[in-house]
Amino acid sequence: SFNESNLGINVLMSPTKHRDAIKLLGARFAKLGLRTKLLLGDANEPRAVDYVKAALADPKAMQYVGAVSYHSWNGGTDEQLIGWHDHAMKARLPLIIAEAGYDPDASKYRAQIDETWYALEELKLNLQCITLSQPAAILHWQFTPDYGLVTGGSSPSDPIRTTQRWWQYKQLSELTPPNAAILPVTSDSPELTVSALAAAGQGVSVVHIANTGAEREAVISGLPNDLKEMRCWVTDHSRSMQPIDAGTVSSGTLEVTVPAQSFLTLAR
């Protein structure tokens, strides 16, 4: 792909030039006997959802496309995030969020990246992207120091320290079943952002909750009626993927206390 070519980092293309580049390069690769495919989009943010329409409408271009891609910087509306899912469905191709991040300029003031509010806003955006865009993969940007998940330790013998963001990514990735289906889920609280996924044949397998506000009671409904309990983990400014009591599931409903400014995961 050409990285963020809709914005011009470092090659600027209009939607039609993006389409034409895919056709030109795809045909050349095929002539050389290469199986290399092109990314459709790889746009700088979800708001650029219309950037790929010209290529999507051209079968000659789409024969050379291997996946649809956007970057999550700055977030987007529900309609824009769903729009990327719709593009991938129309193309019958996987959707990849090839750069996952909250603020593309955060590295200019690196200290904020280790703040709890930043960690939770980034997590909230990831959960929104999972639920609404239903990507096959989300790739964190990036593991170098400017957006890294570790920071300087307290002594020469302990040169690095894992951050809240490191534990959030660990909790999100380790507790989500491989090849899980993404389930439709809604929250009636603006402070709670939720994503639910299911392993094959298990119904709801995991519920991820980002709480950007105060401690609150939450009622989760729509769980399988035969489910009796769920295990629970929390990550916040002082706890790192720590197991806590989740309570009892009754008739498909679970009441749980969501700690302030936290990432809570419930799993079967």
Image: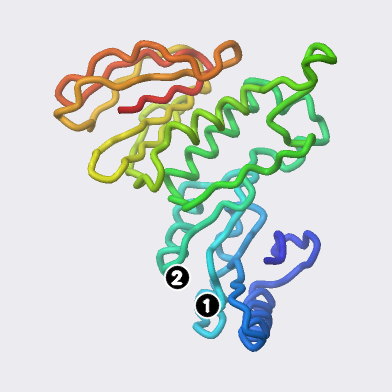
**Residue 70, position in %: x, y?**
59, 56
Give the side of residue 153 with respect to residue 55, left or right: right
**Residue 93, position in %: x, y?**
46, 66
Q: Are marks 1 and 2 in contact (CB under 8 Å)?
A: yes
Give the side of residue 238 with respect to residue 264, left or right: right
Residue 166, located in which quarter of the rendered image? top right
| Tag 1 residue | 62
| Tag 2 residue | 91
Reading the chain from its start, which is encountered first: label 1 or label 2?
1
What's the residue at 36%, 25% (across, down)? Answer: 266
What's the residue at 64%, 72% (across, down)? Answer: 15
Callout 2, which amino acid? Answer: Ala
Alpha carbons under labels 1 and 2: distance apart? 8 Å
Callout 1, which amino acid? Answer: Met
Question: Crowdedness of circle 2 by 10 Å Cα count: few (<14), some, many (20+)?
Answer: many
What's the residue at 60%, 14% (across, down)? Answer: 237
Secondary element under disc 1, as helix, strand or loop, is: helix
**Residue 199, position in %: x, y?**
31, 42
Nearest the viewer among 231 and 56 is 231
Q: Residue furthest front?
A: 157
